[in-house]
Image (spheres, helix red, strand yellow):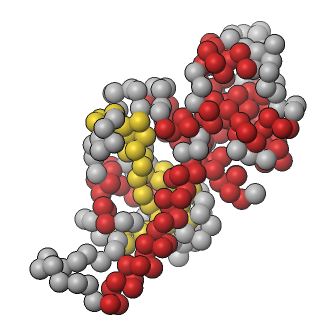
Amino acid sequence: MQVITSARPEWIFPFTGLQPAQFRRLVRLVAERGGDAIADGRPGRQWPLDLPDRVLLVAAYWRTNLTMRQIGPLFGVSHSAAHRVIDTLGPLLALAPVRRRPVDQIAIVDGTLIPIRDHRLAAPSKNYRYSTNLQVAIDASTRLVIALGDPQPGNRNDTIVYRTSGIDQKLAGRPVMADGAYRGNPDVIIPYRKPRDGSPLPAWKQELNDQHRTVRAQVEHALARMKTWKILRDYRRAASTLTDTASAIAHLHNIALTG
């Protein structure tokens, strides 16, 4: 018996974070990317759920972080079928790469720790858990996520992960703002540091730092909104799937933000 279905609009927002109209646009996009043409991995056997319900299952799994044995019965399928749905449709929800971007677009970048059970990529970090460092960049004017880096071990600091995750190449040629943890990257705009002798900053530098902090706070708000999809608070899947999952959640975040 299926408990949750996309045919009942009242289920959509609590389990996806999207309004019904936004969810329908997302389903159409997944269909355009080939979601409707994918079978169940076995010739001659169709999916037990239609495409809207499969998209809802994936989004609900990310939103709630229920186990497969919990999410499957809610949609009237086995836990193995739920696993196949997530593996197949998850990459189709990923954020599309931005091919053209205004040269003067200001990006804000920051890193966040994603606790993960797969220790092949994770490392003990400052949150006392095995985590990965995920770099996220947003557009300062729209607050939309525009780029993500490849997850790196959580014991690496932001200034290194910025260069090794590939996000620096995605943002190349654009002004990029970040906090003081990105010191050592000359192409990143960071706050002024206090002189080594301990003397206070000049008033004009302090004022610029205050403005910098106000603008930079937007990326911290974006990271907090992305983590309302609770799978980013405790990632139980294979580390190799985190890139697609984080990109898809960034896509859902952008859809929800644009109304």
Please identify the quadrant where the C terminus is shown: bottom right
Tell me if residue 195 can be seen.
yes
Q: Residue at x 33, y 27 (%)?
A: 120
Write down the quadrant of residue 105 in the picture: bottom right
Q: In this figure, what is the number of numbered marks?
A: 0
Q: Residue at x 39, y 26 (%)?
A: 118
- Place of residue 81 in the rendered image (x, y in percent of width and height, measured from the top left): 67, 15
Is 62 located above or below residue 210 in the figure? above
Please identify the quadrant where the N terminus is shown: top right
Q: Would you say 115 lies left or right of 5 here?
A: left
Q: Would you say 158 lies left or right of 150 here?
A: left
Question: Seen from this angle, which residue lies furthest right?
Answer: 7
Q: Would you say 203 lies left or right of 11 here?
A: left
- Place of residue 233 in the rendered image (x, y in percent of width and height, measured from the top left): 49, 38
Tell me if residue 25 can be seen.
no
Is 140 located above or below residue 45 in the figure? below
Q: Residue at x 59, y 40 (%)?
A: 229
Q: Residue at x 43, y 64 (%)?
A: 172
Q: Nearer the viewer, residue 3 or 237?
A: 3
Write down the quadrant of residue 75 in the picture: top right
Write down the quadrant of residue 86 in the picture: top right
- Place of residue 206 in the rendered image (x, y in percent of width and height, measured from the top left): 34, 83
